Image: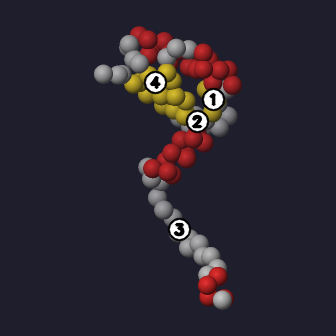
Amino acid sequence: MERVYVQAKRYGSEHSVDRPDIQAFVGALHGAQADRGVFITTSRFTAEAREYVDRVPARIVLIDGARLTELMVLHNVGVQEEQAFILKRVDEDFFE
């Protein structure tokens, strides 16, 4: 059985998650003997944080605010439909 740890941080756009934050998360994974980790933030990750994740042996998935939004819309979680649009195309058979 695999252990997956998840950490979520709700930050404003002015705050980025940096390498020390990810290093602390990796340390927590090792301490808990977890196999994998998911770090979610409403802001973004610095380049140093992403590079660090690529080099550590632990399997870690980083989900930033943009990707989190995509996933929420894709899976219909935490969102509500406000307006629907009908997309029409020309029926070329009509003009023959």
- Most extreme residue toward the left is 1
Q: Is residue 9 visible?
A: no
What is the three-letter code of the residue carrying label 2? Asp
First reached walking from the N terminus: tag 4 or tag 2: 4
Q: Residue at x 58, y 20 (%)?
A: 53
Q: Which residue carries the number 4 mark?
A: 37
Q: Nearer the viewer, residue 10 or 61?
A: 61
**Image coordinates for residue 34, horizontal then vertical, percent:** 39, 17
Mark 1 and mark 2 in contact? Answer it, CB < 8 Å: yes
Secondary structure state at the residue bearing disc 1 = strand
Secondary structure under tag 4 reads: strand
Residue type indicated by callout 3 = Gln
Residue topped by disc 2: 64
| Front: mark 1 or 4 | 4
Q: How is the image coloured?
A: secondary structure
Circle 2: is it few (<14), some (14-19), or many (20+) Cα within 10 Å?
A: some
Which dot marks residue 45? 1
In the rendered image, residue 54, in percent from the top left (x then y), is placed at 60, 20
Residue placed most toward the observer, 25 or 11: 25
Task: State whether residue 67 is above or below residue 88.
Answer: above
Return the residue at label 3: 83
Label 4 crowd (10 A; few <14 / some 14-19 / many >=20) = many
CB under 8 Å between callouts 1 and 3?
A: no
Q: Amino acid at mark 1?
A: Phe
**Mark 2 → mark 3, Cα distance in angstroms:** 26 Å
Q: Quadrant of residue 22?
A: top right
